């Protein structure tokens, strides 16, 4: 089959160390030249894809996240979570997951969540006698929630690539995100209860809980303001990102007073660098998907599915298995942009809800973030702890199993994903 040959040769090219955006662009242009004898339309194809108003939300959400990180808002988030959970078995681990869940709703990035929360939580857990593998696993897995709980950069790119509602994707990710956080909490608490050698503190008083809640009130208000405004129809996804960026500046500059002109410049620079990289990958993926469309590869896939009488569930399971393998070697954004244009016609043919599939895809990409050899959260923990990579991988492995089991549950019960978008939109 031609698509298998194309994907295998593309992977072989990327494994040589060529940057993903360059590999996609060069390979796509080469296929286009071989197929139609010229590449004159490439510039127009790239411009038409990148020139989208919705894509402006990516640098704006990135700027919002970096401003909140530089404002050290995460300290209050973590302290508040710990105040409410410190008396429970594995209270610090539970607080870490809760902090990751809330910060995910601010950052939209798994690496940023793992890096920011990990820098605060891991030293605390080790000081209180937590096993190293448990501490590393909790942060690695909790960090993955950054791309599932909205706002999510990968969801925006998937929505743009497949013309799927960003609002519905964000809503679809909420219940699976909360479910996965709950599964992580149960596992961490069970591990802590069985080990029994971790320090615990007395239950917090009501006044302590009130003070802690007041400290993190502004941090919690940001995602409520951004997402609530979207779902109430006050503003679009792009306008929500802009409003969130302004509110983040208001919180960190005038309320926390931890951000100045230097930090604003650094946040803007980092957001621009991240967005530039994403848009370069998007441009390369656009060339690649354009040539696949010219070669009628998606139509051939649909024809073979019809001939083989493959059902929706079987197709989704097959795609999830393939993405698990791709996630071991490719970066998450590249997987979305390479596979989405190929899969979309098959989704339409089989009557598969693109919102449901998109959330399943993001959950699968979460698994990739803590799966070697290219698990970005694993390398993030390596950078902030300097621990042996083998120990970090062993700590994250139980969470890979938990995430795969959750993925199977979402396949078996689509309503977990689709119920909220159907009710609210």
Image (tube, rainbow, N blue to C red):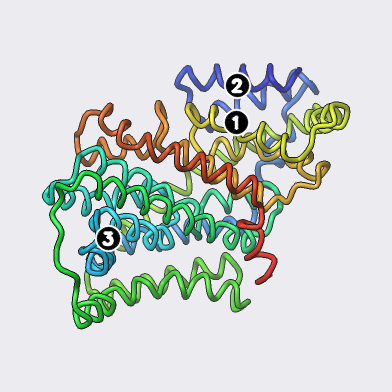
Which image quadrant for residue 372? top left
Give me the disc on residue 321: 1
Image mark count:
3
> What residue is rendered at 26% in x and 49% in y?
118
Q: In the drawing, what numbered circle is on residue 276?
A: none
Q: Residues within 10 Å of mark 3 (few under 14, many from 20)?
A: some
Q: Position of residue 3 (x, y in %)?
A: 72, 22
* Residue 326 placement (x, y as % from top left): 54, 28
Q: For this rendering, which residue is in front, 60 or 379?
A: 379
Q: Under tag 1, what secondary structure?
A: helix
Q: Is residue 115 visible?
A: yes
Residue 54 in percent (x, y) is at 61, 59
Q: Of marks 3 and 2, which one's residue comes earlier in the chain?
A: 2
Residue tagged 3:
70
* Mark 2 crowd level (few <14, some 14–19, many ≥20, 10 Å Cα): some
Foreground label between 3 and 1? 1
Q: CA distance from mark 2 to mark 1?
A: 19 Å
Q: CA distance from mark 3 to mark 1?
A: 38 Å
Q: Is residue 330 above or below residue 273?
A: above
Asked whether 140 or 133 is in front, the reply is 133
Please tell me whether mark 2 or mark 1 is closer to you in this view. Answer: 1
Q: Quadrant of the C terminus?
A: bottom right
Q: Which residue is mark 2?
A: 10
Q: Secondary structure at mark 3?
A: helix
């Amino acid at each position: 089959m031609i698509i298998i040959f194309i994907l295998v040769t593309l992977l072989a090219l990327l494994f040589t160390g060529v940057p993903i955006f360059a590999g996609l662009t060069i390979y796509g242009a080469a296929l286009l030249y071989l197929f139609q004898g010229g590449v004159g339309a490439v510039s127009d194809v790239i411009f038409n894809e990148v020139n989208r108003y919705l894509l402006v939300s990516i640098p704006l959400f990135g700027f919002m996240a970096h401003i909140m990180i530089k404002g050290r808002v995460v300290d209050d988030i973590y302290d508040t979570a710990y105040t409410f959970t410190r008396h429970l078995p594995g209270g610090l681990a539970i607080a870490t997951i809760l902090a990751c869940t809330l910060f995910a709703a601010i950052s939209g990035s798994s690496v940023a969540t793992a890096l920011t929360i990990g820098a605060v939580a891991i030293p605390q857990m080790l000081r209180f006698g937590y096993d190293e593998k448990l501490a590393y696993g909790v942060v690695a897995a909790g960090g993955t929630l950054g791309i599932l709980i909205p706002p999510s950069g990968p969801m925006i790119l998937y929505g743009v690539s497949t013309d799927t509602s960003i609002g519905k994707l964000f809503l679809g990710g909420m219940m699976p995100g909360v479910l996965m956080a709950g599964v992580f909490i149960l596992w961490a608490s069970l591990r802590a209860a069985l080990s029994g050698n971790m320090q615990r503190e007395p239950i917090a008083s009501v006044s302590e809980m009130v003070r802690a809640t007041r400290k993190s009130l502004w941090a919690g208000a940001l995602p409520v303001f951004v997402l609530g405004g979207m779902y109430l129809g006050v503003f679009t996804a792009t306008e929500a990102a802009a409003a969130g960026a302004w509110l983040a500046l208001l919180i960190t500059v005038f309320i926390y007073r931890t951000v100045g002109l230097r930090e604003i410049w650094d946040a803007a620079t980092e957001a621009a660098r991240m967005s530039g990289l994403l848009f370069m990958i998007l441009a390369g993926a656009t060339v690649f998907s354009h040539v696949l469309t010219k070669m009628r590869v998606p139509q051939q896939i649909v024809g073979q599915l019809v001939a083989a009488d493959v059902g929706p569930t079987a197709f989704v399971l097959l795609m999830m298995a393939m993405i698990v393998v791709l996630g071991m070697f490719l970066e998450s954004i590249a997987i979305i942009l390479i596979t989405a244009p190929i899969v979309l016609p098959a989704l339409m043919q089989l009557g598969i809800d693109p919102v449901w599939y998109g959330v399943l895809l993001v959950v699968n990409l979460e698994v990739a973030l803590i799966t070697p050899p290219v698990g970005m959260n694993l390398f993030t923990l390596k950078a902030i702890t300097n621990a042996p990579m083998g120990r970090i991988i062993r700590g994250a492995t139980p969470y890979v199993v938990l995430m795969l089991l959750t993925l199977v549950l979402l396949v078996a019960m689509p309503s977990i994903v689709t119920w909220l978008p159907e009710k609210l939109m």
